[in-house]
Image: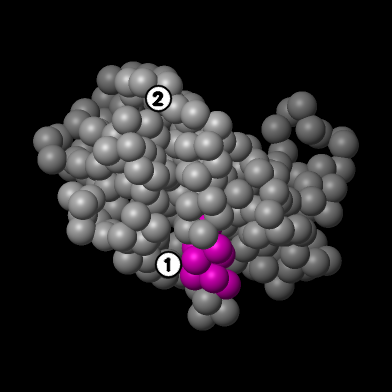
Amino acid sequence: MRPSGRAADALRSVSLQPGVARHAEGSCLIRMGVTEVLCTASVEGRVPPFLRGKGEGWVTAEYGMLPRATHTRGDREAARGKQSGRTQEIQRLIGRSLRAVVDRKAMGEVSIVLDCDVITADGGTRCAAITGAWVALHQALEHCVTKNLISANPLRDQVAAISCGLWEGEPILDLEYVEDSAAQADANFVLTGKGGIVEVQGTAEGEPFSDAQLLGLMALARKGTAELFAAQRRAIGAA
């Protein structure tokens, strides 16, 4: 039995609350079990220098963990003077994932910055950040339409992410920290609502895993993200 007591194919409780940040053009507080991530989307009327004059927009992300997001206090990266490699890797992943479902030509020369701040970490923070950031991005793009910055919402699809892993040889969905830290293998799947694959990150912690096991993890990820896509649609409907 899983330490969480959940069935192998069960998500943790999921909550996506849009519009929680007063000043941001888009925002969403996502909860996956105990894990909580605040995602905000800020609209900027300019693009990076490499895009100027090309008529394309840009979507990028920053990611961070509050000092007491975990059991012991972590130093703020600003106090250390640099970001960790993990932080840089995660925020690049979030940016890639959201750009994959946006028509940047339809944005014009507008940038949206997604800030994903982990309030409480109990596994799956990067996946929660991607899932919640899509809701914040949708809200920000709707704001742009309302303000006549763009003519229509340029989102082409939904995107969400979920972790899967091998626990005692069996595939399980949506790992909590205690499961993730002891899993034989773990993987993060970034998938789109139309069935596309944006990114798969998979690592064996001990024995290599097989093609069949990878396909089993993918099947779980498909099931889990289908539930997350439904939760996203409910959230934007509520917004």
Residue 204 tag number = 2
Is there any visible trace of residue 199 in the rendered image?
Answer: yes
Side (left or right) of 43 relative to 213: right
Is there any visible trace of residue 38 in the rendered image?
Answer: no
Report how far apart the C-alphas of labels 1 and 2 lie in the structure. Answer: 31 Å
- Which residue is disc 1 drawn over? 16
Residue 185 tag number = none
Residue kind at label 2, given as amino acid type: Ala
Q: Is residue 104 above or below residue 47?
A: below
Q: Which region is colored magenta?
A: 225-233
Q: Is residue 198 magenta?
A: no
Q: How is the image coloured?
A: one colour
Q: Residues within 10 Å of mark 2 (few under 14, many from 20)?
A: some
Measured as percent of width and height from the top left, residue 54 is found at: 87, 36
Residue placed most toward the observer, 90 or 209 = 209
Q: Is residue 172 above or below residue 165?
A: below
Residue placed most toward the observer, 192 or 3 = 3
Q: Please, what secondary structure does the residue beneath circle 1 have?
A: strand
Residue kind at label 1, given as amino acid type: Leu
| Residue at the (65%, 59%) spot, across then down | 193
Q: Please, what secondary structure does the residue beneath circle 2 have?
A: strand
* Residue depth check, mark 1 versus mark 2: number of the one nearer the observer: 2
Measured as percent of width and height from the top left, residue 108 is found at: 82, 50
**Quarter of the image holding residue 106?**
bottom right
Q: Extreme bottom residue here? A: 238
